[in-house]
Image (cartoon, rainbow, N blue to C red):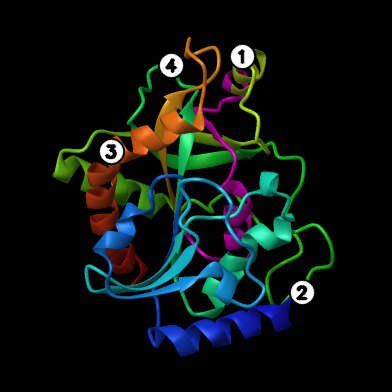
Amino acid sequence: MKKKIKEATQFLQEKGKIQPKIGIILGSGLGGLVEEVTSCKVIPYEQIPHFPVSTVEGHGGNMIIGYLHDIPVIMMQGRFHYYEGYSMQEITFPVRVMKALGIESLLVTNAAGGINESFVPGDLMIINDHIQAMGSNPLIGGNDEQLGARFPDMSRVYKESYRTMAKEVAKRLGISIKEGVYIAVTGPSYETPAEIRMFRTLGADAVGMSTVPEVIVAGHTKLPVLGISCITNLAAGVSTHTLSHKEVIETTERVKETFQTLAKEVVVEMVRKGE
């Protein structure tokens, strides 16, 4: 693992020539934030040693290095998923590489289905906790103490000061914001109404097929995290119509300007909070 991390890190250092402060993972349909990056270097995943390749519509498949609001960032335009057939270690490998590049915090975003019945498509939700329902964990296997502890604490991985800050930024910008628990499932099939009722009973507000493995690895490496979900559709049983990925992309396109405005301001404040 360390050899692979070193090779990917060296490749990106040679390409980017920037010391990023924040890593950003952009979920389905949210890759438009890349348009806001200046001095932008675009590196396709297939060129980076040991990186998987994203196969899902709405995921651009590039690593972006540049500046967002004058903050040096490294940004994943699209992520990898367990349902694509990759291992948990493969889909979280980029987080380890970004950590090795020197990032101080991680902003993760995703498209999610709304379980909370007060949510509507287009809402943005700050993740205050998660439920791991994917049946596997990226930390299974041998552990290298130089990368992180054998049994890392996950109770504070979503940094409280980041969540408070994001709510304050949203209020200042006049952006309505929700807060809640994200539950991760493997997919790629959407959930049944019975499953959604179960998830609601467990305390979940939104459901998706990503994010949690990356956050677990961030916690393993002691990277503080801010997570934001875009509620792109209502989950099965909450919604009465057929669920589709097309709806996910259409909703993220509709709210992309709001999301990008919030994300830009949040990145600046994340740096301030980390200093």
Mark toward the viewer: 3 or 2: 3
State the separation of the CA atoms marked 2 and 1. 41 Å
Q: What amino acid type is highlighted by mark number 2?
A: Asp
Q: Which mark is residue 193?
A: 1
Q: What amino acid type is highlighted by mark number 4?
A: Glu
Q: Which mark is residue 27?
A: none
> On the picture, is 197 further left or further right than 230?
right
Q: Which mark is residue 117?
A: 4
State the separation of the CA atoms marked 3 and 1. 26 Å
Q: Which residue is mark 3?
A: 255
Front residue (pair 152, 126): 126
- Label 4's element? loop
Mark 2 vs mark 1: which is more N-terminal?
Answer: 2
Q: Assess whether residue 202 is covered by the magenta stretch.
A: yes
- Label 2's element? loop
Quick check: 84 above or below 194?
below
